[in-house]
Amino acid sequence: MSPILGIHIAAGTVGLFSGAAAVSFRKGSRRHATAGKVFAISMFTLALSALYLALLKQEIPNVLGGIFTAYLVGTGWLTVRRRDESTSALDWHGLAVISTLAGIYLSYGIQAAQSATGVKYGYRAPLYFVSFFLSLIAAVGDIRLLVRGGISGTQRLARHIWRMCYGLFVASGSIFLARPHLFPAFMQKTGMLLLLGFGPLLLMFFWLIRIRFTNRQKKAKMPQPQVNGAYGVTGLTRANALHSFYELKRQ
């Protein structure tokens, strides 16, 4: 086993455990932030080592997958590392990378669909089209971020969640779904490997739905002041209005 392959396996293992820890800890806590940092570093290592190994073997789809994984984890981590409503040159670089990937995936998908064998570099057209669709979603998110000059609140959390969770899915799928023979027979027969493999995607949808629902609840509970002509708020006293303002700011 080459040293790079050993690093790749070790990084994937650390990525799985640190990602599971980050999901388990309370969001926004110090433990969550620490686990997330370890996860980001390990996933970068996983993606770069996979990219290197794929280049040696001339496995073009795996080269693209390594770049895509590094992009998702990098942009997901960057989303919560900086202030709300801000962007940087890295966002433009990320858009350039994901736009290029989307174009390549679409081109390979069309070439695979039109080929006599139905494959391109050993993979069928649907896989390329799914990767194109995901790349397109990511690119649209980057464009919205740059046009608005940054995002905050629910949109910021959603961007962080889906990118990091999909990165975790890459790690879980690479071991539990792609290599089921490494695990005991009872795990293969009971569907446990499927649950572990697709678990990050299930958690992703759970958290995306939860933050959307929570945001709607907060908006519904916000006091709606009554305005009486030019004299301003009459439905709330000055004290209640100030209390509502600071409560909303704290949330």
Image (cartoon, grey):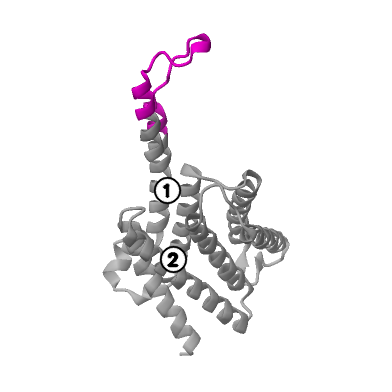
- Proximity of marks 2 and 1: CB atoms separated by less than 8 Å: no
Q: Secondary structure at mark 2?
A: helix
Magenta-drawn stretch contains 221: yes
- Give the residue type that dot 1 points to: Phe
Q: Secondary structure at mark 1?
A: helix
Residue furthest toward the left?
186
Query: Is residue 161 toward the left or the right of residue 101 in the image?
Result: left
Mark 2, Cα crowd under 10 Å, few <14 / some 14-19 / many 20+, is many
Which quadrant is the C terminus positioned in?
A: top left
Query: Is residue 102 toward the left or the right of residue 213 in the image?
Result: right
Q: Is residue 177 visible?
A: no
Which residue in the protein does label 1 denote? 205
At 30% across and 57% down in the image, what residue appears? 25
Q: Answer with the quarter of the image where residue 104 lies.
A: bottom right
At 46% across and 48% down in the image, what residue appears? 157
Which residue in the protein does label 2 denote? 173
> What's the distance in space between the residues labelled 2 and 1, CA to CA?
17 Å
Sequence-earlier tag: 2 or 1: 2
- Residue 201 locus on image (x, y percent): 42, 55
- Give the residue type that dot 2 points to: Gly
- Residue 111 locus on image (x, y percent): 72, 63
- Residue 129 locus on image (x, y percent): 62, 56
Which segment did they paint magenta? 216-243
Residue furthest toward the top?
229
Q: Is residue 158 above or below residue 174?
A: above
Q: Is residue 161 visible?
A: yes
- Residue 45 locus on image (x, y percent): 49, 75
Mark 1, Cα crowd under 10 Å, few <14 / some 14-19 / many 20+, is some
Nearer the camera: disc 2 or disc 1: 1
Q: Answer with the quarter of the image where residue 198 lies.
A: bottom left
Q: Is residue 169 above or below residue 214?
A: below
